[in-house]
Amino acid sequence: MNMDRNTIIGFVLLAGLLFVYLFISTRNSHELQSQRQHYEDSVARVQRGLDSVAAIAKKDTTIKAIFGNDSIAQRNQGVENLVTVENEVIKITFTNKGGQPGKVQLKNYKSFDSSLVVLNGTSFDKISYPVNAGPNLPAQVSDLYFNVGQVVKNADNSQTITFQLPLPTGTLVHKFTLRPNDYLVDWNVQIGGADKLLSQGAFNLTWQSRPMRHESDVKYERLQTNICFYSDNDFDYIMSKTEKKFEKPVQWVGVSQQFFNTTLSAKNANAFTAGEIRWSRHGDSDTTGKIADVTTTLQAKLPLGADALFPMQLYFGPNDYRILRNQPVPEMDKVINLGRDMYAFVRPINKYIVMPVFNFFNSFIGSMGMVILLLTLFIRLATSPLMYPGYLTSAKMKILKPDIAKLKEKYPDQQQFAMEQMKFLREAGVNQFAGCLPSLLQIPIFFALYSFFNSNISLRGEEFLWAKNLASYDILFQFPFEIWGLGNHISLFTLTACITSFLISFYNMSSTPDQGNPALKYMPYIFPFILLFVFNKLPAALTWYYTVSNIITLILQFVIQNYIINHDKLVGKIEAARKKPKTKSKWAERLEQMQEQQKKMQEAKTKQQGKK
């Protein structure tokens, strides 16, 4: 294997794995969008004819059935009241309709339109469970109006808001507690008369969530949205599937966008015994900013008795690793994709190397672009001992290029030339596989950083050079139309990454002997062109890293080959190595035997064709 083939193998592996990753991340997206559009059209046709009548009739019928002719009770139960509770990081508007959180604003984060990020802010978002509001009168809690919430400030500076709903069959109490500087809300459901309000102690929770757009690239945000959950003491997620049934206990379910998530969790590990998730992304033709519609049903069994308590927690906040890892919810930090599935091997790289180094530089450097530059320098410095043999092999191949060219003239047959070249390189003491390492080493590093930069909320909204947001692509030119595979723009950082990749290919090929195979000759030049389509929609942080990494590679190759490696001394070593007696490895012997057999078979085949 020579430097030419080594380079190509590295490029092909990197490109192949990258395309597989992107395919897994985005598969079925068009099908899901089509299903979603068909679903919306069907629902809209039916809903327009039923909503106005059904909503009023249901409200009036339910209130009258539960409270009879008590006009005061009807008036109190039929009016929605909003109460706001906030701390340093979050502002929650509670509603007495269903006794639950309504709109949630994150004070430290802004949406694409510069307004505060809002979670749980649509009419679709609600939490409910069925109760027996009266004899033979089932009702959903989300349709009932609790008494106006009462806010109490506790000794630890936390705040508790309590909603109470007296019913003919019992009493419902929803108690929410918000602590200082915390995105997590404790939610206790207290049921007085549970033996009457619940059928056989069945507590069947339904949670509806509709995440809305917060990023500049809503298409990419939709693709990054997924459903995470913790079932049977193990984290998992769904991205392309539209449903998930829980046959084992589940503790929490989270709707995760690119940088924010809303999570519902039971405090007790095995509280929810079963459940189901159904969800679908909105199509790219949707201009309302809707990302997806998610409906989660969770079943729990409460002890039969007069009173029951079911403790839960709600998280409304950012996908910040430092915040999520400190939550009492188990393995909630895995909501952040630092490496999953077949790329799970890069998660330890991100968790124990990339992230600590990045945070260290970020602790005293304000510019995220400079932090990425220093992170790149650190990675290249740390991997330099492993990369050096590859550079040394490249230098040796450059010295031996004239000899290999003569060898090619002497043996015009490709197979014979390959066999003689392998023998020649072994005699010269050239490690034929050392050249593979620089290309192969890029694979885990690239995918680790792809996951890291793609999910790092600290890059969100950060400007550097011409990029307005390092968490998304930068725009050099905006097209009035879509170009297949490229989108409607050209990213300047993508161009710098592709150009520097081309320069590396040109530099390497200039020192690589001609193999006479056009595919091998031009493949390294094709790869940078492919990167243009792969990188153009990726975060500017990643393409900036790749640009810096390529520039460092070019500088290292030039410095090592021209100022560090002593060419005269290296020539002497090569000559000395060629004079030493060589012992073939078993692998080399088998390879030469195979090549010799192939040569003989080819010669025999040529003779037979000549006779005919």
Image (spheres, helix red, strand yellow):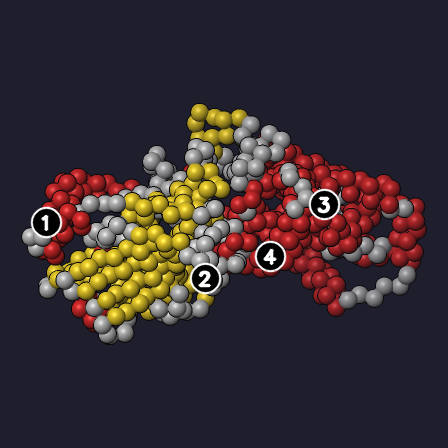
- Identify the residue position indicated by label 1 in the image: 71
What residue do we see at 26% from left, 42% from top?
40
**Cβ atoms at labels 1 and 2 below 8 Å apart:** no
Residue 576 on image: x %, y %: 92, 56
**SS label for mark 2:** loop
Between circles 1 and 4, the one closer to the viewer is 1
Please say if the residues under marks 3 and 1 sit with CB atoms less than 8 Å apart.
no
Q: Which residue is mark 3?
A: 377
Dot 2 surroundings within 10 Å: few (below 14), some, or many (20 or more)? many
In this rendering, which labeled residue sits more in front, label 3 or label 4? 4
Badge 3 amino acid: Leu
Q: Nearer the viewer, residue 226 or 163?
A: 163
Foreground mark, 3 or 2, reads: 2
State the residue position of label 2.
Answer: 329
Q: Position of residue 31 (x, y in %)?
A: 35, 46
Residue found at x 68% / y 44%? 364
Q: Which numbered disc flags the more N-terminal residue, 1 or 4?
A: 1
Location of residue 182 in the rendering, given as x and y in whole percent from the top left corner: 47, 52
Q: Residues within 10 Å of mark 4 (few under 14, many from 20)?
A: some
In this figure, which residue is indicated by the disc labeled 4?
Answer: 351
* Mark 1 vs mark 2: in front: 1
Name the amino acid, label 4: Lys
Label 4: element kind: helix
In the rendered image, the quadrant that contains the N terminus is bottom right
Does residue 19 appear in the picture of this structure?
no
